Image (cartoon, rainbow, N blue to C red):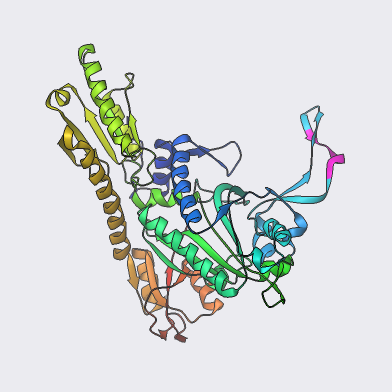
Amino acid sequence: MAKKITSRDNDYSQWYLDIIKEAGLAEHSPVRGCMVIKPTGFALWENMRDVLDRMFKETGHQNAYFPLFIPKSFLSKEAQHVEGFAKECAVITHSRLINSEDGVDVDPSSKLEEELIVRPTSETIIWDTYRNWVQSHRDLPILINQWANVVRWEMRTRLFLRTMEFLWQEGHTAHATKEEAVQETEQMLEVYRTFAEEYMAMPVITGVKTESERFAGAVETYCIEALMQDGKALQAGTSHFLGQNFAKAFDVKFQDKDNTVKHVWATSWGVSTRLIGGLIMTHSDDDGLVLPPKIAPVQVAIVPIWKSDDDQQAVLDYAKGVQKELQSKGIRTKLDARDQYKPGWKFAQYEVEGVPLRIAVGPRDVQNNKAEIARRDTRSKEIVERDSLVGKVESLLDEIQNNLYDTAKERMATRTSTVSTYEEFKEILDSKGGFIYAHWDGTAETETKVKEETKATIRCIPLHSDNEPGKCMVTGKPSARKVLFARAY
């Protein structure tokens, strides 16, 4: 397999696209701004989805499904919400086509009485539904998650990171008290942090968004922010405390224990296929994709090697025995016995696809009761006795998972700076990028000035950082604490 991946140092954007293409993750579709997620990419999403789904259910949530189409009038009920999404909505105006000389045309007589919006997010349709589900405090909390696709009419798109249609999950919960809703928001942020760090091996900073960066209609937006290899930040997940905004807009009330009627308190939270883009840019190298074992579609690829028909069956039987034993331990294993490709081609393929471990088995290995193991992360190889092979694979998968996290964590630390002046801020931003901690006076004017002059934004007000007061790096006005700046995707 010829190397077709651009170096990160030469063209980071092209490197990212090359990884996606050569690893077989996705491709552009005939519809501008949309993508086809190929089997390898979808298997990766399935693994991520399955882990998150288990974590959601362990915290008491259930899955449901709500309509793809939302009446236009629903979006006008919450002013901030419609303002935030109005420019991204795909609108359905007619219900059918008719034959014409050019093929088909829209039937003018099928114009809808009320236009439908293809969901950009589901708060409105869900809260209209919750009005029918809630009467008493006994009906609360409602803890619902939906796995779905959404459409946001993006003008500038990039595979996985920003597409017009993408896959995601969106949680929507209703609570009797503000305290319960805030606790839910913080709990789901912690679920996302745990998933990002323990499964994706992607270190993140947790924090709260500034007012200008909040989700449309939220009282507070909590987030996890990751740092990519090029020094840009990626918002990897958000959890929103919605207060009573949507409950009031859709008149969702309940009778409390004291017989008073109150509006419920709300949250929403979500992550999307954007995580796959974050995964690529956190771990991959110039030779292809690098995947953490916990979510890799294939954790171990076994490549049997033979030169003659006499060797073939013995090698295959040996390899199948290894595969069976690994699978019995729950290790996702692929045995590649295709004879139309040479072993070297297969090795290169699994390297590009990011398979964490590769096991090669040849006639000599069968005779000596051994096998060769190669790691994707460090490129190291070793010969292992057959009797200890499975245990070695298990320990190596753990080592790779930890090594990828430690490497990314160290990179984040190296590319995180603290500044006190605006000049220093701009110099570091242009020279090495990364996360930059600096004092901010809390005003939208200063936040806008920094964004317009440097293209850096306040990624979050960190939940766990130095709370020492100081002076804003731009205006010199008092600042309660440092915030986290970066250029971002």
- 378 and 251: which is toward the camera: 251
- 453 and 405: which is toward the camera: 405
Seen as rendered, the residue at the extreme top is 309
Seen as rendered, the residue at the extreme left is 368
Per the rendered image, the range of residues in magenta is: 105-111
Q: Position of residue 396 (x, y in %)?
A: 24, 45
- 486 and 78: which is toward the camera: 78
Q: Residue 359's quadrant in the figure?
A: top left
- In reply to whether residue 56 is colored magenta, the answer given is no
Q: How many marks?
A: 0
- Whether residue 12 is visible to the viewer of this picture, yes or no, is no
Q: Position of residue 251 (x, y in %)?
A: 74, 67
Task: Identify whether 190 is placed above or below 46.
Answer: below
x 45%, y 84%: residue: 479
Task: Identify whether 470 is placed above or below 119.
Answer: below
Q: Position of residue 187 (x, y in %)?
A: 48, 65
Q: Residue 265's quadrant in the figure?
A: bottom right
In-image side of 2 versus 243 (left or right): left
Q: Residue 311's quadrant in the figure?
A: top left
x 42%, y 52%: residue: 278
Seen as rendered, the residue at the extreme bottom is 478
x 55%, y 47%: residue: 167
In-image side of 48 versus 334 (left or right): right
x 42%, y 61%: residue: 193
Q: Position of residue 210 (x, y in %)?
A: 53, 72
The N terminus, quarter of image? top left
- Whether residue 82 is visible to the viewer of this picture, yes or no, is yes
